[in-house]
Image (cartoon, grey):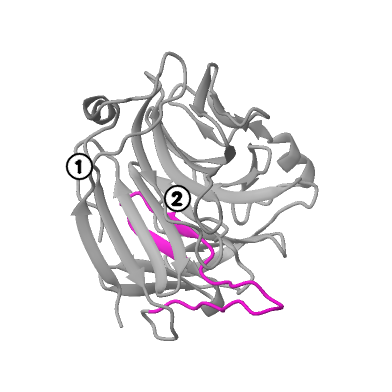
Amino acid sequence: MHVSVALFRLGLLGVVLGGLGCREATSTTEKRSQLAAAPAFAERWIPWGSGPHSLSMRAAIRERLAEGVSAVALDSHGRSYLLDRLNKRVVRVAGQQLRELNRVEEDAEDLTVGGRDALAVYSPFRARIWVHNDGKASGEIVIPRAVAFPGFIHFDSEGGVLLENAFQESYRLGRVGLSQTTATVLRSKREGVWFAADGRALTVKRLPDGNAYLYDGRVRRLWAKNVLSVRLLGVSDNTVCAQFERRQRVGATHIARQLRCLDLTDSAWSFAEDLPEIGLYVPRRSAAMAGRTLAFINPEVSGLRLMVWNIDPAGTEVQR
C-alpha cells in the first residue's frame, strides 16, 4: 500500500467576517473578494499498518481510547513531518513514501522542526525535550515542573527551544548543553507565543458571549457565536493563522473546525478552510504552520489524512 496523493486547486470559500467594520459577505462576488486566490493544495491518505511506509494506530477498546500519530510539523521548505509515536519514530512525507529520520521514545507527544534539519520532540509525562540534528540525537532539555500547564514546543530564530503554555505565554528553555536554571526559565516568561512583524504579541481570548477576539494592541473580533476554542498556529509577515472550533447542531460530534488566516494590516481574512469532523482520536498537534504553508492531520478509519495548503498569493506548488 502506498500514500495516496491528490493535488488540485481549491474553489474560493465564503466566510463570515467579524471584526471592526466587517460585515457578512452576502453575494458570491463579495465572498470571493474577501479571500486570496485559491491556494495550492495537496491531500494524502497514509495507511495504517506495520510497513515502513505505513503508520501505527492502536484502536480504541472499552478501557482505552484510540491513539497513533500525535503531531504534525512543517519545515521552512513546506515539507511535512509526522510523529509516529507508536512506531517510536519521526518520519518525513516524501512523495509516495515515508522517510524515517529519527528514533524517539514512545511517550513523546509533540514535535517541532527548526532550521538546519533540527527537530525536537516533547514528552509531557517525563517533562523532557529531545533535540535531534542531522538525524542524530543531540541531547535533552529538562522542563522545570514549576512551569504551569505546558503545552507545545517551538524553535526560536536562534535555534533555542521555546515552551508555550495554556495561558499563551512562552518560556525560553535554552539549547542542549546550555541548561537553564528554574529561576532563569521562569524569569524568561513572556506574554504571547507569536509576534507581529513590529514585535507586538498576538494573543486570542474567548469571552463568555461566545465570540473570539485577537489582541495585538488592537481588539479584533475573529469569529462570532459558539466559539469553543482558538489556537494560533503562527505568523508570517503580517498574516496570522489559527485553528478554530465551534459548536454546531449537526454532525456526530457537534463540533465544526476551521483554519483561518487574517491579514493584520486591514483585518481581512486571506484564507478560510473547513476541516473534516473529528476522526478516531484528536492528535496533540493536529495543525501546523511554517512560512506560508499550513498542514492538518486527521486520523480516519482508512488511514491518516494529511492536508497541506500553500497560502502564498503567488500560488506556488505545495511540496510533495
Between the residue at mark 1 and the residue at mark 2, the CA separation in whole angstroms equals 19 Å
Q: Amino acid at mark 1?
A: Gly
Indicate yes or no whether the magenta region holds residue 59.
Answer: yes
- Residues packed near mark 1 inside 10 Å, few (<14), some (14 to 19) or many (20 plus): some
**Callouts 1 and 2 close, C-beta under 8 Å:** no
- Residues packed near mark 2 inside 10 Å, few (<14), some (14 to 19) or many (20 plus): many
Q: For the C terminus, which image quadrant? A: bottom left
Q: Is residue 39 left or right of residue 129?
A: left
Residue 115, label in figure? none
What residue does disc 2 label?
288
Q: Amino acid at mark 2?
A: Ala
Q: Residue at x 46, y 27 (%)?
A: 196
Q: Is residue 193 visible?
A: yes
Magenta segment boundaries in residue numbering:
54-82
Q: Residue at x 42, y 46 (%)?
A: 289
* Residue 268 position within the rendered picture, expressed as x and y whole percent measured from the top left: 36, 24
* Residue 204 position within the rendered picture, expressed as x and y whole percent measured from the top left: 58, 31
Q: Check the image and report above or below for 53 versus 206.
A: below
How many numbered tags mark residues here? 2
Q: Is residue 33 left or right of residue 126?
A: left
Q: Residue at x 40, y 58 (%)?
A: 117
**SS state under label 2:** strand
* Residue 235 position within the rendered picture, expressed as x and y whole percent measured from the top left: 43, 35
Residue toward you, 206 or 217: 206
Helix, strand or loop: magenta stretch: loop
